[in-house]
Image: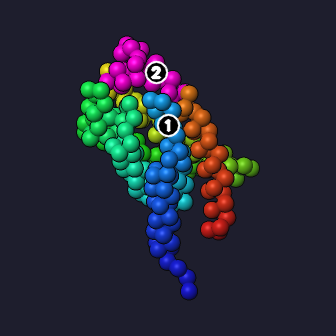
Amino acid sequence: MRIDKKIMDMSFAGILTAIIVLMAVVPFLGYIPLGFMSATIIHVPVIVGALLLGPKYGIYLGTVFGVTSLIQATVRPGITSFVFSPFVTIGGCHGNMWSAVIALVPRALIGVSAYYVYELVMKLMSHKKGSQTIALWLAGIAGSMTNTILVMNGIYIFFGSSYAAASNQLVERIYDVILGVIVTFGIPEAVIAGILTTAIVKILFRIRG
């Protein structure tokens, strides 16, 4: 008996949801503390889901990631967790509604950007050898950098002064710090996301046929 595609998609989305939650709750599995920030690879299941299931599922999975980020910042606060949770106050720096925006919106857009970058590259490189590998790698990078760039710029726009105080930086140099985080942590995260996305999605494409 042939299983309905919608049921299969929902089942796979459920598996990816469980993976995202597991990575979020197990220490050092999804979030790697780096002093005043945490590195993450939780965006990878979001990207994989978007490429396999489409951008709507990408938004859903990204939102799940965002919710775990907000919860993580609330129950395991670090010195800059107020930028991700409206319920956290650290040393006089308060989270607010923009904390929820930073936690949720960039993550919801991870899968969308990855999906459309993949589609665009496949269209531009149609029938060329290695096009799928390149498209998957660039999609992984795009999804990861969407998260990093939007999160870090959101922090600068809505919490620049507070973020500077919490991380012991001069306010007038805080965007240099933001750019430093994007380059130092964001680029390696993106490269890893590109590699993992390519390897995982290629296998899943073959299984799906």
Decide if residue 188 is in sight here.
yes
Q: Main secondary structure of the magenta part?
A: helix
103 or 126: nearer the eye?
103
At x 72%, y 49%, the residue is: 130
Q: CA distance from mark 1 to mark 2?
A: 17 Å
Residue 205 in the image: state x and y as whole percent: 63, 62
Give the extent of the magenta segment.
162-183
Indicate the colouring scheme: rainbow
Residue bearing the label numbered 1: 33
Quarter in which the C terminus is drawn: bottom right
**For the residue marked with disc 1, what is the amino acid?**
Pro
At x 53%, y 79%, the residue is: 3
Decide if residue 46 is in sight here.
no
The quadrant where residue 202 appears = bottom right
**For the residue marked with disc 2, what is the amino acid?**
Val
Query: In the picture provided, is 128 more to the left or to the right than 181?
Result: right
Residue 46 in the image: state x and y as whole percent: 49, 52
At x 55%, y 27%, the residue is: 183
Residue 16 in the image: state x and y as whole percent: 50, 60
Residue 177's disc is 2
67 or 74: nearer the eye?
74
At x 32%, y 34%, the residue is: 82
Quarter in which the N terminus is drawn: bottom right
Task: Estimate how packed mark 2 is, as few (under 14), some (14 to 19) or many (20 or more) residues with alpha carbons within 10 Å.
Answer: some
Residue 115 in the image: state x and y as whole percent: 51, 51
